[in-house]
């Protein structure tokens, strides 16, 4: 049956099978796998293993599907938030969703279309079609760890907020200094104390900014080191409105272009396009190449 008003929320130490749907505003938490035969609506599913949704997710921007140790597999994902350490595999379409994958994001059914939303995959994104003729904004980032990217973005927000506080304190200090210069005799001890407090506050925030910069630099170095293959495989077409970033490189011109079947990859500081390659075959070739290189090293050593 359904997870809804009759069952309430489901929390289980093990795997959960739902033969119906997961209804609006209900949640499932499981330490194993979760399998839903129907659809997931505006609901929350958290698991430590695989999450398989045989029909799909119609999330109305509020559904959240998250697994710490498995894949997310669904027929379609629409207006939902999906987070996984591994792969997201969709048969039909991935529409207007926020998806973070520590592995790959793969659309491989009859339609296999990604339209709208914000997608981050550490390894690669593969689909038949990216975007649509309506040109909705679709952001794709590959070759970066989504978790680390989120940490960097959080520090950048903190930096921005700290900079705003510093600017505010500096304005007050400038006003106070102008008053002192205009009439030094009227500058009271209270004003002197306030002046000292403002200067100390600015110094404290400056130190905080330095700490944030250090944290960001450390995380960026870690992200470069742990970043995956970073490719985008387009079997049929990419429409305008799809922006693509590979590792730290974003090509703004690329988002304005329509492309036919191709593979996008990073070459130094540029995103380049080559013929469409089946991602499974491409990945296998990469692994074999690495193994050959290792063999060479061990022979020469």
Image: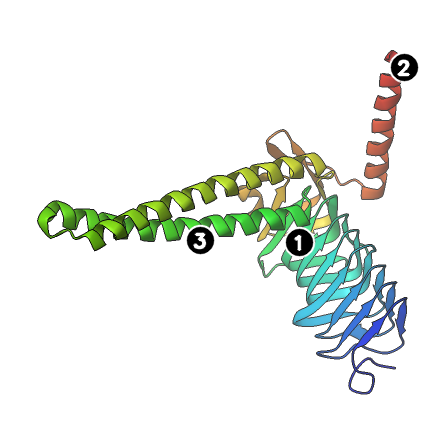
- The numbered mark, 3 or 2, whose residue comes first in the sequence reads 3
Task: State which tag comes first along the sequence, 3 or 1.
Answer: 1
Q: Give the alpha-carbon distance from disc 2 to disc 1, as whole Å.
A: 41 Å
In this orientation, does residue 257 appear? no
Task: Check disc 1: other Cα within 10 Å, few if <14, some if 14-19, many if 20+.
Answer: many
Q: Name the residue under label 2.
A: 299
Q: Going from the N terminus, do you reach mark 2 or mark 1 first?
A: 1
Residue 17 is left or right of residue 66, and the answer is: right
Q: Which colour scheme is used?
A: rainbow
Residue placed furthest toward the bottom: 6
* Kind of element beneath mark 1: strand
Q: Nearer the viewer, residue 200 or 35?
A: 200
Please, what secondary structure does the residue beneath circle 3 have? helix
Q: Is mark 2 on a helix, strand or loop?
A: helix
User: How far across and how far down the image is residue 1, in percent?
Assistant: 88, 82
Q: Nearer the viewer, mark 3 or mark 2?
A: 3
Depth check: give the residue in front, 256 or 231. 231
What residue lies at 90% left-to-right and 67% top-to-bottom? 15
Name the residue located 20 percent from the left edge and 46 percent from the top edge: 177
Give the distance between the C-alpha atoms of the residues marked 3 and 1, in whole angstroms: 26 Å
Query: Number of marks in the image?
Result: 3
User: Label 1: which residue?
Assistant: 119
Q: Badge 3 is on which residue?
A: 161
């Amino acid at each position: 049956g359904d997870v809804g008003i009759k069952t309430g929320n489901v929390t289980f130490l093990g795997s959960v099978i739902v033969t119906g749907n997961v209804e609006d505003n209900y949640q499932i938490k499981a330490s194993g796998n979760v399998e839903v035969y129907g659809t997931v609506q505006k609901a929350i599913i958290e698991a430590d293993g695989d999450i398989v949704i045989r029909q799909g997710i119609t999330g109305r921007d509020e559904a959240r599907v998250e697994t710490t140790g498995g894949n997310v597999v669904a027929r379609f994902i629409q207006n939902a938030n999906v987070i996984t350490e591994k792969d997201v595999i969709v048969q039909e379409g991935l529409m207007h969703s926020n998806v973070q994958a520590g592995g790959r994001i793969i659309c491989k059914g009859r339609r296999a279309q990604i339209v709208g939303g914000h997608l981050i995959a550490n390894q690669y994104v593969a689909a038949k079609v990216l975007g649509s003729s309506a040109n909705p904004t679709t952001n794709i980032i590959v070759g970066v760890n989504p978790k680390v990217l989120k940490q960097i973005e959080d520090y950048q927000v903190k930096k921005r907020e700290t900079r705003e506080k510093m600017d505010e304190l500096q304005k007050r200090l400038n006003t106070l200094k102008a008053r002192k210069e205009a009439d030094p005799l009227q500058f009271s001890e209270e004003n002197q104390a306030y002046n000292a407090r403002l200067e100390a506050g600015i110094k404290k925030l400056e130190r905080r900014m330095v700490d944030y910069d250090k944290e960001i630099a450390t995380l960026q170095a870690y992200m470069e080191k742990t970043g995956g293959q970073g490719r985008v495989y387009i079997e049929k077409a990419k429409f305008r409105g799809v922006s693509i970033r590979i590792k730290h490189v974003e090509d703004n011109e690329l988002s304005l272009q329509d492309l036919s079947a191709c593979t996008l990859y990073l070459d130094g500081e540029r995103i380049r396009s080559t013929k469409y390659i089946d991602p499974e075959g491409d990945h296998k070739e990469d692994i074999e190449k690495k193994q050959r290189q290792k063999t060479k090293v061990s022979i020469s050593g």
